[in-house]
Structure formats: structure tokens, C-alpha cells
Amino acid sequence: MTVPHAIISGASIAGLSAAWWLHRTGWAVTVVERAPSFRDGGQNVDVRGVARDVLDRMGLMDAVKAANTTETGAVLVDRNGKVTAELPSDGVDGATAELEVLRGDLARTILDSLPTGVEFCFGESIEHLDGVDADTVLGRLTATTTTGRVLDADLLVIAEGVRSRTRDRLFSKPGEVDARDLGVTMAFGTIPRTPSDDDRWRWYNAIGGRQVHLRPDPYGTTRAILAYAGRDDLAGLERGAVQARLRERYADAGWQSERVLDGFASSEDVYVDELTQIRMPSWHRGRVCVIGDAAWCVTPMGGGGASLAVTSGYVLAASLSKVGGPTDPLDRRDLNTALAAFDEWMRPLVDQIQNIPKGIVNFAYPQTRLGLTVRRVADRVLTSALLRPLTAKLTRIADSDRALPAIAER
Ligand SMILES: Cc1cc2nc3c(=O)[nH]c(=O)nc-3n(C[C@H](O)[C@H](O)[C@H](O)COP(=O)(O)OP(=O)(O)OC[C@H]3O[C@@H](n4cnc5c(N)ncnc54)[C@H](O)[C@@H]3O)c2cc1C
């Protein structure tokens, strides 16, 4: 029996979900991760729509529920912390989802449930690739990593996140990767909890296009986000410079900005993201497939990145299970058929999230006092008893009427 081999580059939610499902469907799997060890950390993500079914099929629903952030709802507050509107959070897909979990906890849950046999190469990345477009049955691809390790494989899955270098190297023709700057910067970090924090997500808007978010976590600390309209290229700056820039931006923002800035100064896990949507007309080429944020980063503004990442591992494995066979090595035609089926199933889910209405940044991040007033009125209307059911639909993402593709038994 021929066991196909997949290399997965990136050991976060998409890469680990793909490792889990490819291993389950009979593949030998090697995961290459640039970081020296598994990357914990990160703030709130949620699991919605079809991703819930995928987690259920993995038997991880209870483990993810147990890791829940403990958040019970979401409110908008004014400069004094007074609640101005309450976002719908009832049901599994509210503003606070039933499966609201920290990124690191979700990734760790999948990692811990991987069966033995999945090989990990931490502290390495792919330096050189041969045979990506090899046409024959024997034409496997060869990857050489930064430590000189040589890996032969039938398939390379790129799950390296939004700034994936391997993707950019392999899909370098004009139009193959469209990276759209949304003009929003976010800084996430963990800060000490204070008695004024409650079990709700509190969301404050200040003029100058600035937001402050405080959310509970299950570890007795508070997860904070500073999000603002504008770009400072923070990702390229060293920690002190990031702090200084944030302090300048939030100088007069009010509410709990000072506390968050002070907290970030000593926080170990400040993560900065300049929101960039990734769009690719095709997510595959030859023996290579791109998944997760590397393929379609929807950004926290669209939401649903973790759900798509979880789902993509399953859909990839299910699509591949329908080609090749116990005695036939996968040729490029088979792969093309499977990867096209993967693309076809995932794309509507991605499109649904990526089509952010024009002008949403101006609405979500008001610059002026008038803009802020308009936003507050709109928040009240949208969360009123009359429109609440409609507003609740906005958080139903990664949802589909289609059943997940089945896994073909061999
Ligand atoms: C440490 C961390 C913290 C995060 N925090 C938040 C957060 O607070 N809020 C939020 O909304 N989203 C956060 N994200 C992003 C979130 O995880 C993703 O949006 C989503 O879950 C999709 O995940 P992904 O697996 O596609 O990509 P990612 O989670 O971005 O993971 C990509 C993985 O690939 C690895 N990698 C990158 N380049 C290479 C390379 N060349 N070779 C090998 N490996 C490589 C990275 O180290 C990482 O482990 C965070 C991601 C990381 C890695």
C-alpha cells in the first residue's frame, strides 16, 4: 500500500487541523514550523458555523467548551464605562459565541489530540522546493528546510498565516496574491484583571477612529485590544517603539486606555496586526495548496478566521480522500481534481466573510464627535428589540446550508 506524504508548513490552527485530518485519512504528515516550539498565546477567537461540526467530528467539542473564555456577553460603553448598547449574545453564534476561546488554547487542544506519528520540525522553514509542478506519477516534490533536512512529499500544504513567505515565493505572478490593506491596526495583549472588570466584552469607541476592548479570560487576567483606523507599520517595530506609538495614538482617548497602555508595557504577549485581507483566485498550484490565513486572511474585522482554519483541514482531507487509492500514488491530475474540489467547497464561505461593505471602516472607527454620535444612534437602533434578530445574523459566519463533504473510505 502506498502511503501519501504531506508536508504542512505552519503549526497553528489551519496547519494543525490539516495534520489531524490528513493523518486520520491515511497520510504520513510532517509539520514544519518556523518558531522554535509550539506557539501559545493570542487572544479571543471563536468557532462558528460548520467549524463546530468539524470540531465535533474530531471529538474536541467538550475540550474546547471547557477552555471557554468565560465571557457571557458583549456591550458598548461610553467614556465613563456606562453601557450604551448590548450586542446580541444569545444562541451559539452571538457576538460572544458559545465557543469563544483563546487562540493558543484552541491550537493547543488540536495539537494535544494529534495521534503519535505526526512528525514535527520546529525551528525550521522551507528554504528550497523542487518538483512543485512535476507532471508524472513519480514526480513528488522535494523540500529542503533551513537546517538542510530534505523531505520528499506528494503534497505541500502552506498554512503560514497572512504573511506567508512560501506562498509569496510560489505564487509570485501578478494577480496570484492580492493583499488588501484595510487601513486598521490592532494591538492585542494580556493585562492584569481589576475588580472593575466583569464577565462581558466591553467595547469603547473614541473619536480619532480609536477603539478599546476589554474581555475576560479563564486565567484571571484580562484580554485587551487597542484597534484604530490608520497604519503605523507597527509589525516591523521593536517593542519600545510600538509602545511609544500606541501611547501617542491613545493620548486623550479616555475610558481605560491608560490602564491598557500601562498593562501592555509589561505584558509578555503583545501581538500587533495591521489588518490585511488576502485574496487568491486559486489556492493551489501543482503539488501545493494554500490554506488558512495564508490563503484568505479575513482579518478580525471580517471575523471567522479560526473557524475557516479549522474547517479547511477537514475539507482538504475529505477532498483528497476521493482521489488516488491504496495502490495508486497520487499523480498531479488527481491532486488537481481534489484541490479544485477543496477550492469549490471553501470559496463561498470565504467570499461571504470577505465582502465587507464599503465604508465600514469609517462607520466602525468614527473620527469626529458627529461620527461618534451617529455610530451610537446606529448601535442603539441595530440592537433594539425590533432589529435584534437581523443584527444577530451578522455574527452568523462560516455558516453553510451545504453538508460538509464526506470522507471516502478506502
Ligand atoms: C502567536 C499568534 C497569535 C495570534 N493572536 C491572534 C489574536 O490575538 N487575535 C486574532 O484574531 N488572531 C490572532 N492570530 C491569528 C489567528 O490565529 C488566525 O487568524 C487564524 O486562527 C488562522 O490561523 P492560521 O493557522 O491560518 O494562521 P496563523 O495562526 O497566523 O499561524 C501561522 C503559523 O505559521 C507559522 N509560520 C509562519 N511563517 C512560516 C514559515 N515560513 N515556515 C514555517 N512556519 C511558518 C507561524 O509561526 C504560525 O505558527 C494569532 C496568530 C499567532 C501565530
Image: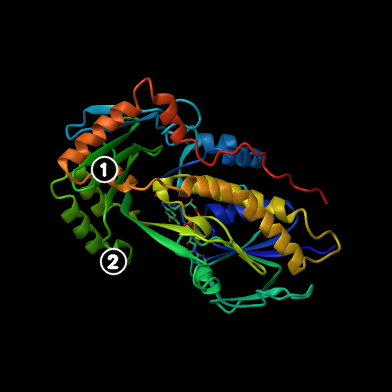
Relative height, residue 122 to residue 369 (above, below): below
| Residue 146 place in picture, x, y as percent | 53, 76
For disc 2, the neighbor class at 10 Å (few under 14, some 14 to 19, many from 20) is few
Q: Is residue 8 left or right of residue 299?
A: right
Which amino acid type corresponds to the residue marked 2 in the rendered image?
Leu
For disc 1, the neighbor class at 10 Å (few under 14, some 14 to 19, many from 20) is many
Q: Is mark 2 within 8 Å of ligand 1?
A: no
View extreme (left): residue: 252
> CA–CA distance between discs 2 and 1?
21 Å
| Residue 347 place in picture, x, y as percent | 58, 51
Q: How is the image coloured?
A: rainbow
Q: Residue at x 51, y 30 (%)?
A: 92
Which amino acid type corresponds to the residue marked 1 in the rendered image?
Val
| Residue 341 place in picture, x, y as percent | 68, 54
What secondary structure is marked by label 1?
Answer: strand
Label 2 or label 1, whichever comes before in sequence order = 1
Relative height, residue 363 to residue 329 (above, below): above
Q: Is residue 138 left or right of residue 73?
A: right
What secondary structure is marked by label 2?
Answer: loop
Q: Residue at x 32, y 47 (%)?
A: 359
Quadrant of the image occupied by residue 84: top left
Which residue is label 2 attached to? Answer: 237
Quadrant of the image occupied by residue 157: bottom right
Which residue is label 1 attached to? Answer: 212
Q: Which mark is residue 266?
A: none
* Mark 2 in CB contact with mark 1 (< 8 angstroms): no
Q: Residue at x 25, y 30 (%)?
A: 377
| Residue 315 place in picture, x, y as percent | 65, 50
Q: Is residue 373 left or right of residue 7?
A: left
Q: Nearer the viewer, residue 48 or 102?
A: 48
View extreme (front): residue: 358
